[in-house]
Image (cartoon, grey):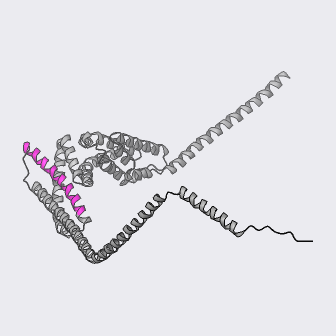
Amino acid sequence: PPRPRLFMPALSSLKRDLTDTLQSLASEIDRSVDVDQFRSVSAGIARHEESIESLCDSLAVFEETCSALTTPLSSVAERIGAKLDERAKLNEQRERLRLLQRLAQTLHHLESLLDRPPAPEGAGAAEALDDLLRAAREMGRLRILRERGAEQKLRAVRPGLERWERVRKTLLRQLTDSLHAALAAGDEARAARVVLGFADADASAEATHWLRSEWVAPRLVPQLKGAVARGTERDALPRICAEVLVFARGGAFRPLRAAALADPQRPLHLLADSVWAEACAFLKGTPHLFGSLAGTPAALHAAHTATVALQAKLEALLQTPAERHYFRCHPAGADLMRRFNLPIYFQLRVQEIAKQLEAALARSDAAADTAEDGDGDGGGDGGGDEE
């Protein structure tokens, strides 16, 4: 069969159609795009490109200048750092020199206060006490300065140590003399001021040591020995406790219980470290008192009860919680209570109670047996009578 013939448009007509389409698209693009704006944007971009190129040139010049200045500036920075380090060292040396100056001035002032001749009784004595307490405060300041000097490792402080020790011994001797005079006179206010002077001088331990050895022991120990001698050793401990309480409440120790000494910030613990410690030491030095209580639960119980009561009454004389806590935890009191050996006392009490209980049970059993025997005898007699 014959093949169908394809219809092919003429090339001229195709060219004409394509040309018309292209022209219509070009006109459409012209209508949709603002040619003037596009041209202005292009011109702006060209100008910015020129500015960026000029800035790049400036940056290159600046980089060259900075590289040229880096070496001299680094040397200048090193010199500035060295000067700053030198300044810090000079400031440190200045502080050390000031510290040494304050140490020398304080020590000289302290020596001038202590080298004054003793004043007579009266108004001069009051001024002398004021100077002594001022010297005590200066001693406290001097101690702080010495500690700072030791922290900074000042070699110039070492030659003054002997001088400082000599001044401190002089101050403590004058304080103890003044405290002894105040206690002997019963001057509560003066005694309190002197004791606080000990605290200002950071010598509270020295104050309590002197009180215990030079004031409490010579007065309390003879009374305790007398209490032991007034009766048997078995009941001596309650008498000793009574004497300790009398002394703590008495006039010899009353100035040391002044309200002015109850400072919560710096508790002095005079009662615990002098009266209580000396009483415990006396009991520790007489071990036969506890040996006499062996095997006698009643006497041991009475002695322990008296000791606990003494602790409670002495604690009631204290005025601050810190003092009461220190008194309860005092090592002398803990050692004293261990000497009672309460586990052994408990065993003795248990044995004593067990013996009494066994005796009571034995009597009860015997009474029950007697009652049963009586009931049996009575029943037999009744039956015989009936017969």
Q: Nearer the viewer, residue 245 or 34?
A: 34
Q: How many marks?
A: 0
Q: Main secondary structure of the magenta part?
A: helix
Q: Nearer the viewer, residue 333 or 84?
A: 84
Q: Is residue 186 visible?
A: no
Residue 212 percent location from the top left of the image: 27, 51
Residue 39 percent location from the top left of the image: 45, 62
Position of 325 relative to 152 (above/below): above
On the rendered image, what quadrant is the N terminus found in?
bottom right
Q: Examine the image and state in which quarter residue 90 appears.
A: bottom left
Residue occupying the point 56% across, 44% down: 352
As drawn, the residue found furthest toward the top would be: 386
Residue 115 percent location from the top left of the image: 9, 56
Residue occupying the point 86% across, 69% down: 4
Residue range of the region highlighted in magenta in the rendering: 119-148
Q: Nearer the viewer, residue 212 or 319?
A: 319
Q: Is residue 300 visible?
A: yes
